[in-house]
Amino acid sequence: MGVFTDLTLSDARDGLRKRDFSARELTEAHIAAVEAIRPLNAFIVETPEQALAAAASADVRLGRGEGLPLDGLPLAIKDLFCTKGVQTTAASRILKGFKPPYESTVTENLLNAGAVMLGKTNLDEFAMGSSNMTSAFGPVENPWRRAGDNRPLVPGGSSGGSAAAVAAYAALAATATDTGGSIRQPAGFCGIVGLKPTYGRCSRWGIVAFASSLDQAGPMTRTVRDSAIMLGVMAGHDPKDSTSAPLAVPDFEAALTGDIRGLRIGIPREYRVDGMPAEIEALWKQGIDWLEQAGAKAVEISLPMTKYALPTYYIIAPAEASSNLARYDGVRFGLRVPGATLDEMYENTRAEGFGEEVKRRVLIGTYVLSAGYYDAYYIKAQQVRTLIAKDFAKAFAEVDCILTPTAPSAAFAIGEKADDPLAMYLNDVFTVPVNLAGLPGISVPAGLSSDGLPLGLQVIGKAFDEETMFRVAGVVEQAAQFTHRAQGSRP
Amino acid sequence: MALDKATVARIATLARIKVPEADQERLAADLSTIVTWIEQLSEVDTTGVEPMTSVAEMTLFMREDKVTDGNRRDDILANATSPARGAFFTVPKVVE
């Protein structure tokens, strides 16, 4: 039978249905794996008792032949999803000890499908970061190491704990969220598959809000098929989120036909950025060759507004964050730091409760929304966002999908880039435009850097056409045959 | 545009985040770097371009006008870190 934790989500699902093993055995193996990877700091809270109880119920249903779509499958949940009765912090000191009295729609969908929650994973504070170094619970370590170098590396961010847990074989899959690359970039850094769906595909209800017009939930998995299975359960219209699309959820798994003959794949000229390592450029070229060999046609496209995507994002996201984070005032939940007056209580609570990067973004957001600057910054950014979306619309009139690298570098060491926010922001140069345009994007592990670290390729799809995107991603996966494992994945 | 100490103090007040005077200089430098960088957007000609307010091209749907949730006082108060008095959140005195 091999090791339970080595199974893919789809193999584990099939094995459970055939009763080759029990949900309890599968869950116990994953609980042990979660304990074994504690040095990575991937989890903020572990929920083994809850997991075993869920596995027991799953075994009853599976025994009757009435298994639910994800029955008995152990998952990790990013600590940005509210989970009823289980501490939810967004990795911020301001929410330490907060136990939501309700369940987010996405996690409820997963639990209703029989999934087993192993615990809550670490992240950048309020999902603001690309390295997981801004967490109030300490950084997460990437299970990968550079060849011949034992320095701990970042897993990427903000969904660093989810990425590390999946890459270290401690969970079959994990939930994550992506505002500017927070699923795809850590998936790239950890050698796994990370998907950001179309804006509106998954409900945002019960997810701690960062930037509401950009945030989307999505899965982190080890295969494209597992990603399709997870999205099928996570997605769907929710009356509690007015931006969730009232559309039926397609059978994403069925889209993985492997047949991409005749598809047109856009290759954006502007994504050849200065200073991008030659090996990433080479991997991108390799990806184009793979798709052409499978019968697709590569077409050069132009996305002229690309260079303005990051500055646009760093106006819009902080502006929305400054408004969303106004709710953390010490009055109703979370941290309260006393003050002589009500205003002083707010100011003390927020000064102590928020970390440096969160404060920086709330202040920038407040600035760009303040009287006299609103038009020059915020409205201007919204106008450029329109132009960015138009770039993609024009490109998608000619092509079915777009292929790009996921990030301009492989994982870096913990502590690197920490003093330079702008250098950190550049991590998301290829992922941010996708959020601004509301499109789906998936990162697939495609190769290794010269020092032995995973590199990802990103497939971008048309809005609400995740199926074609999955189909292309499946071909990349098949061609890449990425079977490398992180050194830290067998603790 | 470079932000000065006074601007930092003003936006910190608007954001209700206490920033000690000793930190204002450093923060002003930090934020100035970011603001100067985002100002490259001024190169883009946006004459006549509609600001994007929603990335999803869809009309908001209407829900049936009926109560679907409520009567959850204890749930709502369960996370109060303040000394909740009975069924209320408490804050420092705001009326003289």
Image (cartoon, rainbow, N blue to C red):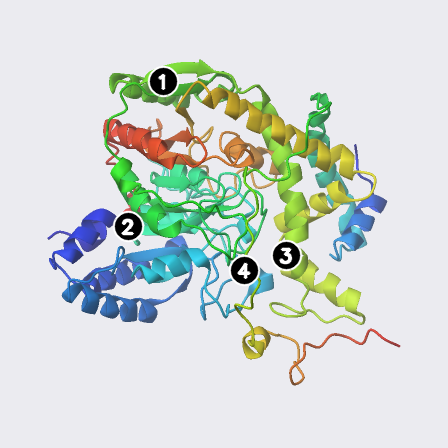
Circle 3 — which element? loop
Mark 1 or mark 3: name the one nearer the start of the chain. Answer: 1
Are the residues flagged by discs 1 and 2 in contact, CB closer than 8 Å? no
Q: Amino acid at mark 1?
A: Lys
Q: Amino acid at mark 2?
A: Tyr
Give how far apart the Cα atoms at labels 4 and 2 are. Answer: 45 Å
Mark 2 neighbour density, 10 Å: few (under 14) some (14–19) many (20 or more): many
**Which residue is rendered at x = 68% and y = 51% of the image?**
A323
**Which residue is rendered at x = 40% and y = 40% of the image?**
A195
Mark 3 neighbour density, 10 Å: few (under 14) some (14–19) many (20 or more): many
The chain containing the residue under callout 3 comes to A
Mark 1 neighbour density, 10 Å: few (under 14) some (14–19) many (20 or more): some
Asked if residue A79 is positioned above or below residue A459 in the image, the reply reads below
Mark 1 or mark 2: name the one nearer the start of the chain. Answer: 2
Q: Amino acid at mark 4?
A: Glu
Are the residues flagged by discs 3 and 2 in contact, CB closer than 8 Å? no
Give how far apart the Cα atoms at labels 3 and 2 are. Answer: 32 Å
Q: Is residue A29 left or right of residue A397?
A: left
Asked if residue A324 is positioned above or below residue A418 in the image, the reply reads below
- Front tag of 1 and 3: 1
Q: Nearer the viewer, residue A243 or A152?
A: A243
Location of residue A36 in the rendering, given as x and y in whole percent from the top left corner: 30, 58
The chain containing the residue under callout 4 comes to B
Q: Which mark is residue A169?
A: 2
Is residue A37 in sight in this rendering? no
Q: Which mark is residue A285?
A: 1
Give how far apart the Cα atoms at labels 1 and 2 are. Answer: 30 Å
The residue where tag 4 is placed is B64
The residue where tag 3 is placed is A354
Q: Amino acid at mark 3?
A: Phe
Mark 4 neighbour density, 10 Å: few (under 14) some (14–19) many (20 or more): few
- Front tag of 4 and 2: 4
